[in-house]
């Protein structure tokens, strides 16, 4: 359901009932008041429901139903202080529900009580135990992270704010913005929304001053503003069209869902004769779900919006439609990188194609927080990054817009210190945002699975340089802030235990902005084998590789799969010979010997002896052999070339089903026929080395190509540099197939 406190700013002001505010003067018993409160609650008249429930509570009805309803009403209206008070009572009841724990944690977080919020959120996560969901919330750690570098932003309230709700700015042009307000400057009877007892929202525009303030607020011209709510909007680049949010109307009447709720819809208006004239509804408006908060790409070819339509990730999600010749195509959900199981709202696309939006489902500082997501090379938005304080804080922060220079803009918030419910704030972004994430985890004693307290943990760069050190807290927990597209090692040191470590790469960091790495400390006794499998062609570690440890004498085999950090470990027996095989479908396999002869205890690190860099098997993809050089007119490989070929032979023996061709190439200078013959001799010499090392003849072939397959423009008769000619003198192998 779209109308939830979790997206109060999406809907609270926009919410949606045609219920006029009435001051129910009902008297009588607590039960009667509860019934009246329930009726108001079901109609989403939360301000009215609170009055009834509080009278019932005063009459002694402080039961689970009343306390939960009071807490929920206050949470939906953004009064998190009162919500916290009533949830604190609710969670003490024996039949409390998991959602009560979640809501209580959210209220505490919105009140800046991050440690308490983390404790209750962790209880919620343990209660639900959803598959794939995190088991720890790390709320307090994220709070510290998001308060990093707060002087990056300069924030202040604008002059046009009033004592009622003002929010949801969008650009009208370079000097003006449109926003929603409950200031109600209409002549006649003042109508109020049952949701929060404030006047219905209308759209206004205001002038932007050189200092970034907003002044001279004026209601939009034309028939955009109706008797109900109008809210977040977007204007086309040529200022000819506005798409805006409104209660779903038909012939002036709200269209209600089957359960009696009037939903949100998107409408289009055009600038005609110096006023906005409503012409049509958005194609995907629906009386059974809300559709609102439109945003446009710079070229107007993609329309973004927010909806609770079926099939989403949960709560409200952000969708996108493509312009298909004047008609909007089917809505496309932006996916889990953007949409969480909770609520996303207020999308905005800047001049660079970056998405800014509000969410209470990604790690944040309070209720709704503002996030940034940059577009990837495939057009999809990458991981959502919290923009941090002071734009974000414990309360709701949302409706972020930024100018084409990427320096100034506006957002909305219900933070303390403003004039009213929601206020508009201007900002200056002094430095670009950084992609910063969290690495966190627990240090655990491997013998009894207990947390290790007050132990040193280091964050190391890929080259072993210590970046930061910390100690575990009373729960055995450590936390570091890390940057995107980096590799790290997290190492823990403890007396009586071998150093424990975890590897991580932030190249493909999850949408939760966090990487969890628990470190197990094993006793400083016995022999341990460990290693880390990496990608050969890019940053990161290969998860899910099968690692087999074979005792050569007994043939006893142990296996395990590499973890998120590409890591594996085994306990070994002294005075034994082993073979380690590492494999995963689609990758070249590796095999290597390990001995414990003469070893009593310690760590055997395979990465110190071997490059555990795994390449995908690309059928038809040429792989260069870097050390194949010959004396002039010679076909005999030198020692370095021979050693490289022996390594290739070993690789092929470890991957016994692959069929490979080796190709020898020359540049275009000299006699072409002679070059072709010499290349074939060299190819045959390579073939001899590989076959002498056990590679079956049906699996390997070699061919001399001369200058027939250049990699650049340097064919015969074309003048080229020595470097360009050298690029064509090469030896490479290609996987051509797989033995059946």
Image (cartoon, rainbow, N blue to C red):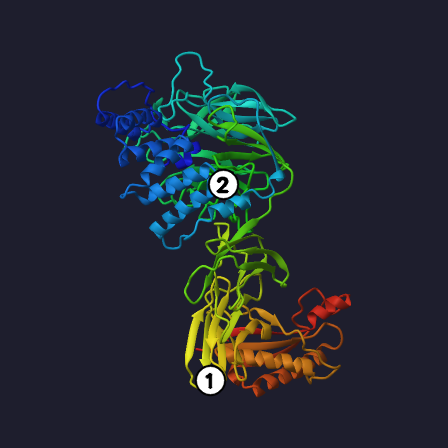
Q: Nearer the viewer, mark 2 or mark 1?
A: 2
Q: Secondary structure at mark 1?
A: loop
Q: Nearer the viewer, residue 44 or 626?
A: 44
| Residue 251 visible here | no
Residue lying at 56% horizontally and 80% vertically, measured from the top left: 650
Residue 611 occupies which quadrant of the picture?
bottom right
**Residue 116 percent across, percent down from the top left:** 43, 43
Q: Nearer the viewer, residue 712 or 608?
A: 608
Marks 2 and 1, the one that precedes in the sequence = 2
**Residue 401 percent across, percent down from the top left:** 55, 34
Residue lying at 42% horizontally and 27% vertically, measured from the top left: 13
Above or below — where is 84 with respect to 656?
Answer: above
Q: Nearer the viewer, residue 142 or 662?
A: 142
Residue 368 in the figure: left or right of residue 263:
right
Residue that mark 2 sits on: 365
> In which quadrant of the rendered image does the N terminus lie?
top left
Residue lying at 35% horizontally and 31% vertically, measured from the top left: 73
Residue lying at 35% horizontally and 53% vertically, measured from the top left: 129
| Residue 138 visible here | yes
**Residue 319 percent across, percent down from the top left:** 44, 41
Q: Secondary structure at mark 2?
A: loop
- Tell me if mark 1 has few (under 14), some (14-19) or many (20+) residues whose alpha carbon lies within 10 angstroms of its own: some
Residue that mark 1 sits on: 552
Q: CA distance from mark 2 to mark 1?
A: 56 Å
**Residue 664 percent across, percent down from the top left:** 65, 77
């Amino acid at each position: 359901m779209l109308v939830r406190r979790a997206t109060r700013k999406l809907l609270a002001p926009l919410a949606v009932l045609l219920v006029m505010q009435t001051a129910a003067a009902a008297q009588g018993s607590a039960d009667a008041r509860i019934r009246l409160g329930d009726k108001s609650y079901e109609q989403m008249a939360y301000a009215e429901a609170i009055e009834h429930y509080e009278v019932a509570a005063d009459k002694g009805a402080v039961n689970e139903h009343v306390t939960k309803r009071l807490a929920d009403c206050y949470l939906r209206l953004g009064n998190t202080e009162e919500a916290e008070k009533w949830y604190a009572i609710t969670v003490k009841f024996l039949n409390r529900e998991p959602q009560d724990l979640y809501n209580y944690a959210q209220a505490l977080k919105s009140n800046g009580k991050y440690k308490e919020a983390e404790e209750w959120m962790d209880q919620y996560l343990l209660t639900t135990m959803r598959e794939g969901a995190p088991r720890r919330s790390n709320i307090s750690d994220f709070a510290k992270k998001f308060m990093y570098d707060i002087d990056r932003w300069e924030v202040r309230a604008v002059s046009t704010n009033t004592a009622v709700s003002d929010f949801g700015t969008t650009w009208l042009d370079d000097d003006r913005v449109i926003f929603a307000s409950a200031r109600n400057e209409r002549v006649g009877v003042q109508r109020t929304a049952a949701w929060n007892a404030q006047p219905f929202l209308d759209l206004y525009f205001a002038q932007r001053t050189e200092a970034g303030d907003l002044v001279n607020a004026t209601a939009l011209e034309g028939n955009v503003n109706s008797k109900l709510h109008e809210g977040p909007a977007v204007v086309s680049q040529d200022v000819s069209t506005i798409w805006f949010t409104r209660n779903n109307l038909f012939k002036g009447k709200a269209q209600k869902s089957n359960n009696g709720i009037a939903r949100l819809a998107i409408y289009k208006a055009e600038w005609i004769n110096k006023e906005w004239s409503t012409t049509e509804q958005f194609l995907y408006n629906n009386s059974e779900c809300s559709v609102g908060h439109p945003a446009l790409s710079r070229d107007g070819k993609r329309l973004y919006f927010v909806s609770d339509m079926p099939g989403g990730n949960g709560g409200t999600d952000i969708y996108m439609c493509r312009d298909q010749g004047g008609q909007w195509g089917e809505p496309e959900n932006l996916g889990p990188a953007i949409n969480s199981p909770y609520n996303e709202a207020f999308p905005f696309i800047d001049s660079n194609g970056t998405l800014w939006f509000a969410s209470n489902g990604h790690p944040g500082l309070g209720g709704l927080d503002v996030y940034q997501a940059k577009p990837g090379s495939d057009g999809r938005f990458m991981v959502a990054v919290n923009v941090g304080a002071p734009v974000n804080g414990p309360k709701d922060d949302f409706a972020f817009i930024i100018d084409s220079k990427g320096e100034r803009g506006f957002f909305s918030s219900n933070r303390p210190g403003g004039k009213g419910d929601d206020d508009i704030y201007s900002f200056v972004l002094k430095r670009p945002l950084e992609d910063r994430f969290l690495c966190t985890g627990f240090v655990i004693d491997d013998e009894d699975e207990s947390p290790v307290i007050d132990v040193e943990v280091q964050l190391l760069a890929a080259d072993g340089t210590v970046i930061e050190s910390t100690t575990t807290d009373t729960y055995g927990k450590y936390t570091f802030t890390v940057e995107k597209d980096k590799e790290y090692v997290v190492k823990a040191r403890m007396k009586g235990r071998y150093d424990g470590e975890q590897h991580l790469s932030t190249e493909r960091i999850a949408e939760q902005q966090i990487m969890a790495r628990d470190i197990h400390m094993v006793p400083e006794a016995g022999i341990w084998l460990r290693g880390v499998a990496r990608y050969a062609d890019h940053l990161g570690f290969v998860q899910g590789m099968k690692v087999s440890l074979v005792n050569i004498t007994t043939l006893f085999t142990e296996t395990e799969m590499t973890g998120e950090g590409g890591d594996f470990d085994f306990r070994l027996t002294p005075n034994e010979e082993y073979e380690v095989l590492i494999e995963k479908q689609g990758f070249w396999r590796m095999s290597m010997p390990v001995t414990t002869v003469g070893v009593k205890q310690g760590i055997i690190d395979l990465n110190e002896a071997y490059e555990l860099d795994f390449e995908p098997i690309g059928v038809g993809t040429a792989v260069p052999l870097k050390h194949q050089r010959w004396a002039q007119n010679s076909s005999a490989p030198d020692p370095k070339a021979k050693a490289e070929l022996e390594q290739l032979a070993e690789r092929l023996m470890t991957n016994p089903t692959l069929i490979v061709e080796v190709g020898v190439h020359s540049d275009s200078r000299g006699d072409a026929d002679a070059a072709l013959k010499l290349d074939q001799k060299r190819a045959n010499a390579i073939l001899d080395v590989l076959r002498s090392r056990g590679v079956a003849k049906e699996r390997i072939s070699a061919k001399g190509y001369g200058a027939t397959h250049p990699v650049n423009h340097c064919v015969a008769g074309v003048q080229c540099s020595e470097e360009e000619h050298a690029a064509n003198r090469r030896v490479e192998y290609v996987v051509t197939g797989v033995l059946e």
